[in-house]
């Protein structure tokens, strides 16, 4: 059974119907009906909107359907205990960044350590007073709201993001400068097989990542533009780079020291969640490209490559439909011979999909490229 509590004039079934102007939304998971109602009443009086669940399974379903701003969860419950709830929600990108507070009648250190190791943000032991509960919730929500501010797609935004995290978590001491430098077109940024000293943030320009096979043939694994991070997978896995990176055009790229990045990453769930999502998106994109290479025609692959480059071209103020890339690089993105690429581009030009100039491709009909059948 799900119980929805609100002390407002609205009567909504759950969070998804709430206007943005209402207060923060809290999911309360507690099997004891009297305790559940008492806590809900306290939170309502403080101005929060509360949804309640009587066991862990219901709580997980509600959280995954519409993630709340914070979760308060009992440890010992039927169906699914609080540790199980936290384990499931921490593995899901929708809910991994939601602040999580445990409620428990147990005060042993082992129970406390187990909850915190799983990623809990706080641990309140019953019995507790109203002020203790409300202070814990307010502190965690404030921290979460600050860290959820979206990263501005420029170097000032990057600095603000790190400085914000540092000010919220005094224990995090970010040392060293974020080193920025200019890379000329075709200049190497990092090489496959080398050990990473940090991650890279693209302030301006475009970058390709690529691999070279035993025959010396290059295959471009990704194209990145201003606002993107690269090189973080090797840092997260503590391995050598598995691909190389080079500037596709004159670019300004900033390196974030490895120690600074890992210290912040492992100290803040919100930061970790951002990079989990980046990893997930990259994995899905690469899987799609592998499927495309295996099953799609050259025409379809060329169209997909052009659309991918078009989507990363928002910083081209003069003409966002104009793509600057060499035929050789484009053929390496598509995974085909340069001659085959040139023939396909000529066909697209005759069909009115694109226009061609030296070193440039202008997209004339995005919709037709998206719906190209063969």
Image: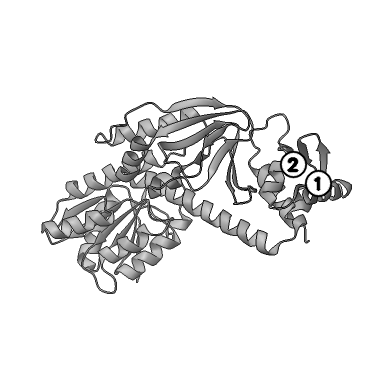
Residue neighbourhood size for the residue with mark 1, other residues' Cα within 10 Å, grouped as few (<14), some (14–19), many (≥20): some
Q: Residue furthest front?
A: 215
Where 32 sits versus 333, above or below? below
Q: Position of residue 291 (x, y in %)?
A: 63, 62
Residue nearest the viewer, comparing 307 with 340: 340
Q: Earlier in the sequence, mark 2 or mark 1?
A: 2
Q: Using residue 62 as the reference point, say whether residue 127 is left or right of it.
A: left
Q: Are marks 2 and 1 in contact (CB under 8 Å)?
A: yes
Q: Residue furthest left?
A: 108
The residue wearing badge 2 is 327
Which element carries disc 1, helix, strand or loop?
helix
Q: Residues within 10 Å of mark 2 (few under 14, many from 20)?
A: some
Q: Is residue 23 visible?
A: no
**Residue placed at 41% from the left, 28% from the top?**
178
In x, y percent, where is residue 235? 40, 44
Secondary structure category for the residue under label 2: helix
Q: Quadrant of residue 370?
A: bottom right
Quarter of the image for the C terminus: give it: bottom right
Q: Which residue is mark 1?
A: 342
Camera sees residue 372: yes
The answer to whether residue 208 is above or below residue 129 is above
Q: CA distance from mark 2 to mark 1?
A: 7 Å
The mark tally for this picture is 2
Furthest-right residue in view? 350
Residue in front for this viewpoint, 24 or 239: 239
Q: Residue at x 24, y 36 (%)?
A: 171
Chosen colour scheme? one colour
Q: Quadrant of the N terminus?
A: bottom left
The tag on residue 204 is none
Residue 317 point in image, percent of width and height: 68, 30
Whether residue 203 is situated above or below residue 123 in the rendered picture:
above
Residue 170 location (% of width, % of height): 25, 34
């Amino acid at each position: 059974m799900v119980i929805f509590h609100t002390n407002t004039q609205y009567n909504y079934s759950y969070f998804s119907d709430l206007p943005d102007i209402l207060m923060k939304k809290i999911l309360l998971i507690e099997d004891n009906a009297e305790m559940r109602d008492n806590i809900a009443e306290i939170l309502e009086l403080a101005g929060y909107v509360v949804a309640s669940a009587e066991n862990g399974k219901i709580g997980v379903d509600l959280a995954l359907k519409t993630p709340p701003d914070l979760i308060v969860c009992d440890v010992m419950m039927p169906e699914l205990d609080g540790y199980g709830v936290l384990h499931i929600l921490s593995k899901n990108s929708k809910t991994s960044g939601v602040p999580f507070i445990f409620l428990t009648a147990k005060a042993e250190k082992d129970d406390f350590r187990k909850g915190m190791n799983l990623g809990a943000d706080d641990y309140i032991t019953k019995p507790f007073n109203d002020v203790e509960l409300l202070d814990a919730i307010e502190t965690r929500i404030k921290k979460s709201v600050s860290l959820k501010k979206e990263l501005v797609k420029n170097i000032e935004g990057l600095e603000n993001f790190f400085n914000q995290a540092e000010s919220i978590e005094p224990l995090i001491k970010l040392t060293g400068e974020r080193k920025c430098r200019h890379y000329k077109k075709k200049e190497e940024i990092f090489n496959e097989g080398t050990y990473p000293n940090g991650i890279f943030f693209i302030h301006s320009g475009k970058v390709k990542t690529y691999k070279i096979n035993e025959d010396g043939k290059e295959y471009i694994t990704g194209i990145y533009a201003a606002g993107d991070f690269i090189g973080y997978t090797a840092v997260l896995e503590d391995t050598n780079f598995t691909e190389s990176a080079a500037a596709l055009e004159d670019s300004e790229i900033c390196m974030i020291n490895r120690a600074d990045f890992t210290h912040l990453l492992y100290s803040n769930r919100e930061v970790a969640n951002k990079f989990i999502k980046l990893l997930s998106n990259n994995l899905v994109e690469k899987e799609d490209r592998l499927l495309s290479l295996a099953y799609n025609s050259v025409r379809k692959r060329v169209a997909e490559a052009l659309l991918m480059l078009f989507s990363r071209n928002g910083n081209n103020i003069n003409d966002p439909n104009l793509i600057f890339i060499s035929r050789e690089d484009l053929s390496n993105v598509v995974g085909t011979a340069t001659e085959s690429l040139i023939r396909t581009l000529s066909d697209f030009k005759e069909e009115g999909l694109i226009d061609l100039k030296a070193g440039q491709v202008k997209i004339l009909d995005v919709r037709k490229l998206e719906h190209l059948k063969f």
